[in-house]
Amino acid sequence: MIQTFLRRPTSAGEFVADGVRLLGTLSVIAAAIGWGPVAFGVCAFALVGVYAPRFLGLRPAFDVALGVTVLVAAWSSVLDVYPRVAGYDLVVHFAANGLIAAAASVLLERVGAVAAGASRVQVAVLTTTTGMSAAVVWEVAEWLGHNFIDPSIYVAYDDTIGDLVAGTLGSFIAGLTMRLLAADSRSVPAPGSHAAREAGPRPL
C-alpha cells in the first residue's frame, strides 16, 4: 500500500483526487484557525477518508467521491448545516456510509480477509455489515462528543435511528455496485506477488 500511496498521478482524475487531498489538508488548518479545536478535530478525522483512497489505489472517480463526501460531511458539521436543513443529515449518512463501507471492503480484500472470487452476494453482505458497523461507530462518536466535548452536537433517538437506517441502505447499495466501484484499481502489487508477476513493471 505504501508503493501505491507514493505512486505519481498519471491521469487528470488522479490529479483531481490529489487536489481534493490538498483541499482536505488546508481545511484542517482553516478549521483550527477559524472555528476552534472541535472543528479542527472533525476535519482532522475526515482526513482518514481523504487519504485512505490513495493507499488503497481506488479508481479516481471513487477516490474523488469519497474525499469530497467526507469533507462535505465534516464541514456541514462545522457550519451547523445538519439541524438547519431537514433531511440533509440522512442524505449525507447514506452517501458517506456507503462510500466508506465500499472502501473498507476494498481494504479487507487487500489484506486477504476476503477470499478471492467472492460472489456478488457475499461482497454485498460484507459491505452492508461493514457499513452498519461504521454507522454505529459514527453514532457512538456523536454521543460521546455531545456528552463529553460539545453539548451543541445534536443527538436524539429518532435522529440516531434514521442515521443508522440511511447509512445501512447506502452501504447495501454500495455493496451491490462494488464491481463498478472497485474496477480499474491503481493499486501497485507487492513485489514478488502473483499479481505483480502477471502485471509486469508499472511506470511511475
Image (cartoon, helix red, strand yellow):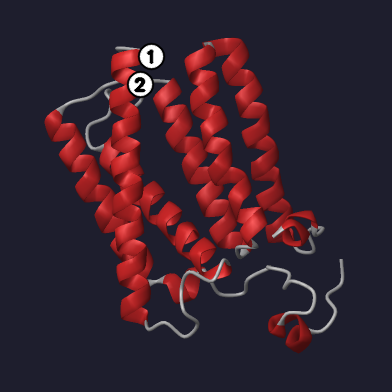
Q: Disc 1 residue type?
A: Ile
Q: Considering the numbered disc 2 on the image, is that residue within a helix, a strand or a loop?
A: helix
Residue 74 makes an appearance in the image:
yes
Q: Report the disc number at residue 145.
A: 2
Q: Which residue is located at x 74 percent, y 53 percent?
A: 15
Q: Are marks 1 and 2 in contact (CB under 8 Å)?
A: yes
Question: Is 176 positioned to the left or the right of 193 in the image?
Answer: left
Badge 1 crowding class, 10 Å Cα cut-off, few under 14, some 14 to 19, many 20 or more, is: few
Q: Which residue is mark 1?
A: 149
Q: Say which of 37 and 118 sits in front.
A: 118
Residue that sits furthest to the bottom in the current view:
198
Badge 2 crowding class, 10 Å Cα cut-off, few under 14, some 14 to 19, many 20 or more, is: some
Q: Is residue 25 above or below residue 16?
A: above
> Alpha carbon of mark 1 to alpha carbon of mark 2: how far?
5 Å
Q: Which residue is located at x 47 percent, y 28 percent?
A: 75
Question: Is 95 positioned to the left or the right of 37 in the image?
Answer: left
Q: For the C terminus, which image quadrant?
A: bottom right
Can you tell which quarter of the image residue 202 is in?
A: bottom right
Q: Position of residue 50 (x, y in %)?
A: 59, 44
Q: Is residue 82 above or below residue 88?
A: above
Can you tell which quarter of the image residue 14 is in?
A: bottom right
Q: Position of residue 97 (x, y in %)?
A: 37, 50
Q: Position of residue 30 (x, y in %)?
A: 62, 19
Q: Considering the numbered disc 1 on the image, is that residue within a helix, a strand or a loop?
A: loop
Q: Position of residue 171 (x, y in %)?
A: 33, 58
Q: Is residue 107 above or below residue 22?
A: below
Q: Disc 2 residue type?
A: Gly
Q: Which residue is located at x 81 percent, y 84 percent?
A: 200
Q: For the N terminus, which image quadrant?
A: bottom right
Residue that sits furthest to the left in the current view:
158
